[in-house]
Image (tube, rainbow, N blue to C red):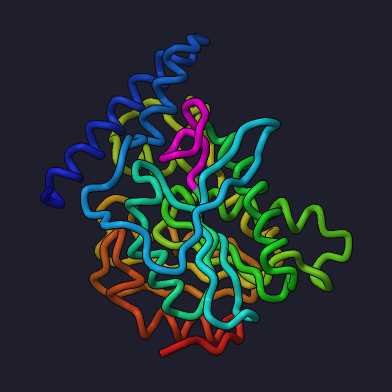
Amino acid sequence: MSTFVHRRRWIRAALIVATVTLLSAGGCAELAQKERELVFRVEPGTASWYSGLPSGVREIEIPVAGKQHMDAWWWPAPDANAPAVLYLHGSRWNLTGQLFRIAQLHDFGFSVLAIDYRGFGKSKGELPSEETVYEDAQAAWKRLSELQPDAARRYIYGHSLGGAVAVDLAHRLAGEDANGLDNPKAAGLIVESSFTTLGDVAEAVVKTRWPIRWLLSQKFDSVEKIAGVHVPVLLVHGTGDRYVPARFSEALYAAASAPKKLLLVEGATHNNSMRRGTDEYRTALSELFGLTLKR
């Protein structure tokens, strides 16, 4: 499907979000649910380009919220002491639509734990919400901590909407850490093609005098949280991203605490910064986190 068609659908969805949120200000639960449907845009089934799990990937279940479970993929690196990363995807596509990016992280030398939030893919549950995806990320981090016990080798990665989930997780971990910078529970945070707040994205796409940001029930306020994550932060964005402009990552970079790095991949789109800027990406990971990665 062409980029133009995708963009037109995105704009149409954003317009609907604006209308729905204006109406939902009156407290209609049904319309608030419609907002969540448009934010997460869950595509059922398997992505058309998915051809199966690569050798070495193990499908596991992660318990969350009592008797519920998330579906997850664990892809260990050949080196048992390799750094491990929690992969948090964005809206629309489940894990079957994420494999190309997960594979690149594995090719860099990471062990990768990738999850489908409840309501995505094989993960049972109702329509996701900001609250439930945050809960899911925390449950997944607990599992990653078991798979890689060394906190100095554990990283968080989030793409697009998943970037906001990643920022929230890093912020929560910093808040739980009694020793602050001396004993971080994560070694670093990687945020790709993400945004400052959901309201900022909506206002960037929908030109209206209505105060959309104040009416959205789903906030995803990364710019408020990112200064408090207290771990090195790598922000990556393609300069050709037509869905989420690169200026949002520039704003997150300005708000983040050092050490931090901003990588703008020239000409990359919303989904291909890692592929188009592979060497730059690897160099940034090495320089900021001190990792020795595969080439």
> Looking at the image, which residue is at 46% across and 41% down?
198
**Picture quarter with the C terminus:** bottom left
Q: Going by the image, does 259 lie left or right of 182?
A: left
Q: Going by the image, does 16 lie left or right of 77?
A: left
> Looking at the image, which residue is at 39% across and 43% down?
91
Residue 226: image quadrant is: bottom right
Residue 161 drawn at (x, y percent) = 45, 48
Residue 44: image quadrant is: top left
Magenta region: which residues? Answer: 116-128
Answer above or below: position of 186 versus 208: below
Residue 269 drawn at (x, y percent) = 26, 62
Can I make out residue 147 in this image?
yes
Residue 253 drawn at (x, y percent) = 52, 66
Which residue lies most toward the right here?
178
Q: Going by the image, does 151 lie left or right of 295?
A: right
Answer above or below: position of 155 versus 35: below
Residue 240 drawn at (x, y percent) = 24, 64
- Give the prevailing secondary structure in the magenta stretch: loop
Residue 154 is covered by the magenta coloring = no
